[in-house]
Amino acid sequence: MMNKIFKFGTLLTSLIVIASNSPFFEVAFAQEEKDKTYTIEQFLQTTSFSGASFSHDNSKLLVGNDSTGVFNAYSINIADGKMTPVTKAKKDSIFVVSYFPNDNRFLFTADQGGNELNHLYVQLPDGTEDLTPGENLKASFLGWSQDDTKFYILTNERDARFFDLYEYQVEDYSRAMIFQNDKGFLPSAISPDGQSIALLKIETRDNSDVYIYHRGDQSVRCVTQHEGDISHAPMDFTPDGKSLLYTTDRDCEFEYLMQINLASGETKQLVKYDWDITGGSFSKQGNFFQISINQDAQTKLTLFKYPSMEKVALPEIAGASITSATLSNDESKVAIYATSGQMPRDLFYYDFSEKPATQLTRSLNAEIDPKELINGEVVRFKSFDGVEIPGILYMPRGASKTNKAPALVWVHGGPGGQSTMGYRGLIQYLVNHGFVIYAINNRGSSGYGKSFQQLDDQKHGEGDLDDCVYSKRMLISTGKVDSDRIGIIGGSYGGYMVCAAMAFRPDEFEVGVDIFGVTNWHRTVQSIPPWWEAQRKSLEKELGDFDNLEYFRKISPLFHTKNIRKPMMVLQGANDPRVLKVESDEMVAAVRQNGVYVDYLVFPDEGHGFRKKKNQLRGYKAILEFCEKYLSSANQ
């Protein structure tokens, strides 16, 4: 077991499950008066925080935040909560990784303008050193050695398709390749003695195996041999290094936790729920093990003593749920992130010998009353074929049966992504200005079992899109949504769904807001980044044969733009390596040829997602203005 940096899944809050015999569910909400509205400038004065690493003496925590407009690294003095900037980036965001185990050096990662070609850097007292120099390479941190003399970095500098594993010396950063990756493995964990490496081998999304590489004899062996479609993924080595913990969905809809003795091959089940276990790792000394569970679109974090697997109580954070926990190396303290729809991700410090937890950050702009924000609620409805579809409903306080509101169906990224509970700045901004948001988890979404996720395989733009259309019935059934003022919004795969809705269901939604969405699937799959090679077969199972031009033209909105007749908005990062800018350029030009209004915003210094606050301000404000003009006033 190495001292591993783990980030558990995301977000949270209260949920409701509503039963009904009708084709869709009736949802009742208390009528309340509309509260104060806030500007986008006020929302963007909220600070986003990321990362948490204890210093060697437990006196400080290393975090990242975007208070300057881009992410930088900060040191928080635990005793008094004072936050001090330790980097001063102005152009590209810096994302913290970890303090060094025995001094105040720290690691961080950054790319160039959103191109996703991350390098690993060490911050020194007198400057910064790039540990992975070179052009067109991508690197990531895998962890510290158990004895704190080494650390591990993955980089695809040798072959752009595959990530090799390097062992770096803490003292002088000299390195040696310890695993040359020529077969598309994904190195995932390293044993406490540093001699064994757990590898993930993905055949498809539904079929994967765990291998063990032994540095001594350079042998590779599969420890999860099976037939058929079964998923396996390595989590962490046990403290004695004799066993490996991994997740699997063998004979089950959801991922559960198993342990295998590496010498005998004997396996045993450790933890199982009716939801996916999405992560798991040991603490530095090996006395604790934590797992994260994706429970109905919210992360549940559980901490166990090891080896007894007795649950350890974490502090309760009023009105919020804990989404991640980082233990100090001596295991006496823990840094906790918690969030809700009314509280952006905030950091808390907890000493196991003291109570209660201390809040170290207050991310929400003090000008915004959290009580005026909306906690989403999980609401389900029956779709066109009876399949139950979940989603998260955000209802503005001003909406009522006598004051019906416009609505947007919000589609997540992916394919295979999921909308989760918690704070989303753009959603809260739109809801605060009177828009109902339904963040749908249509068929094909993760988190609801493998059968549900497989329902849209090679059927994109069909049942998944009809789920979005049928969600309108649920919205209308609330009595608070104007049936003539419902639009659709989404990013990446969600942006594809927006364009598909406009092209394939042209009368269903009054507007479409496409945020870097796929419009030509054939070009997208042919231009996937080389470092996605290990996931190529998985993408082919999801999307279809990459050479099937006829099928991809059928499902690609770009080739059906003549059907589009409702206003659209498109937002695109110029450096996006996943959905190339040309996708949006051609879509906008084709729709405009129909005489249809399209508002097109391009951000020259962004990639697949908008990190810089100046761009968020421009983009989010434009989205609201577009929706107020073409949706709030539609048919009025």
Image: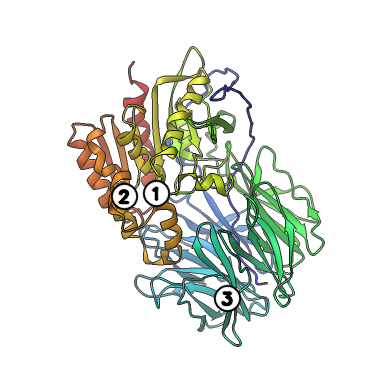
Q: Amino acid at mark 3?
A: Phe
Instruction: Please say if 628 is above or below 467.
Output: above
Measured in 3D between alpha carbons, the distance from the residue under mark 1 to the one under mark 3, in whole angstroms, is 31 Å
Q: Amino acid at mark 2?
A: Phe
Q: Name the residue beneath numbered marker 2.
A: 552
Measured in 3D between alpha carbons, the distance from the residue under mark 1 to the one under mark 2, in whole angstroms, is 28 Å
Please, what secondary structure does the residue beneath circle 3 have? strand
**Residue 485 figure quarter:** top left
Q: Is residue 38 visible?
A: no
Q: Residue at x 35, y 40 (%)?
A: 514
Q: Name the residue beneath numbered marker 1.
A: 610
Please, what secondary structure does the residue beneath circle 1 have? loop
Q: Residue 270 in the image: x percent, y percent?
A: 74, 59
**10 and 160: which one is in front?**
160
Measured in 3D between alpha carbons, the distance from the residue under mark 3 to the one under mark 2, in whole angstroms, is 43 Å
Q: Name the residue beneath numbered marker 3.
A: 151
Q: Residue 273 in the image: x percent, y percent?
A: 70, 49
Rendered-image quadrant of the C terminus: top left
Q: Which residue is most to the front?
A: 227
Mark 1 or mark 2: which comes first in sequence?
Answer: 2
Position of residue 276 in the picture relative to residue 457 (left or right): right
